[in-house]
Image: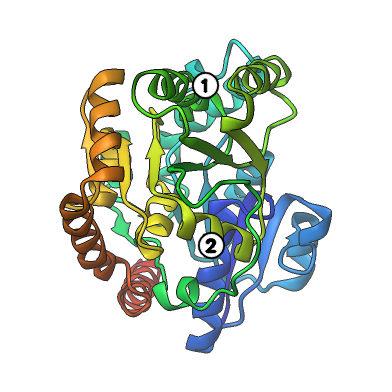
Amino acid sequence: MRAVHQVLPAFVGGDAIGNFAVQIQRTLLSFGFDSRIYARSVEPAQLGRALPLHLHAAHTRRDDGLMYHHSIGSEALDYVRALPGPRMMIYHNITSGHFVRAFCPSLANQLDAGRRALPSLVRVFQAAATVSGFNAAELVAAGFHGAAVLPIPVDPLAWRRAPTRDLSVRVAPEQKLFLFVGRLLPHKCPHELIAWFDWYGREHDPSAMLALVGGFDDRFESYNRALLAAAKQCGQRVTITGKLDFAGLVNLYRRADVFVSFSEHEGFMVPLLEAMATDTPVLAYDIPAVRETLGPAGVRCEVKSWSAIGELAWLLTHDEELRRHVLARQRERLAAFSVERFRTALAAMIESWWNGSRRP
């Protein structure tokens, strides 16, 4: 196996799955493999990083290895099913369609189709991998014999070296800034976060600010309008920035007093690593993947009690001893996601996959 290529349903700038595919590609190239990324749809600005899927057949050999990133029902999967050669699935978890059905039934159908396909994929792929044990358990439940866990790596030095620039949010030095980073979708619950923050401002800190960094999905027109209206009702205290480039994102993390998440479904949640890499205390609703990614670090809340979350938020922004303790645990936790561990795990995964694919 001299080449290992990757196929995604879609490649979009700033997307966690696309970024992970690029990290895998760079590491494969450093191992000496030929490696390219293909996607069923490629955002025009990303055409230098990924190629349209229709070019795959002309650019590859029958014995090339292929990794398919499964995150939704897609025609890309139908294409991969018919390919010869060694195939591995990287499973990123699939959000249940019930979270989005009221806003976008067609997307809900795609999501549910992706989940329903899992048992049939046992016969399609010779190996499977995921970014978390939580995801691996779902594959075992679907009939897979096991899955390698390949945690997403983070390089804290890259975040520390990012240049300083003006913030995209106006916030005074004495104001406390809460931050959420992620796509503004119903299952991530930015609507609940804004509602909680409005309450927090009335009950605890009227000068506090909230910044939400992430893009809207045009398919969720009514949800987007409601979210913007809720933010507007909070006046200047809530800002939705849209997507930011790397330097802009790093500087906002650096300024933030707390990263806060109300998300109800994740397969890993990369922004948790980003917050830890920039020494931003994490306060998150306690769901399985968040619990696994954070480990003993950060602060998790088991119930969405506004008063309980509000008390924790107040302590994280005013109790210096607690902040020091939380940040120390977060720095320790980052070691589990080092680039070195990622390279070692990927090399072992490739070797096991290749050896398994040669068995009769």
In the image, what residue occupies the spot 54% across and 48% down? 172
Query: On the rendered structure, is 8 left or right of 186?
Result: right
**Residue positioned most to the top:** 102
Residue position marked by numbered label 2 in the rendering: 250
Q: Is residue 305 visible?
A: no
Other residues around mark 2 within 10 Å, as few (<14) / some (14–19) / many (≥20): many
Answer yes or no: do the residues labelled 1 and 2 have beta carbons within 8 Å?
no
Res 358 → quadrant? bottom left
At label 1, which amino acid type do we have? His
Residue under pointer 1: 191
> Of marks 1 and 2, which one's residue comes earlier in the chain?
1
**29 vs 49, nearest the viewer:** 49
**Outermost residue toward the right in this view:** 44
Q: Residue at the location (54% across, 55% down)? A: 252
Residue 205 percent across, percent down from the top left? 39, 29
Q: Is residue 36 left or right of residue 289?
A: right
Amino acid type at circle 2 is Val
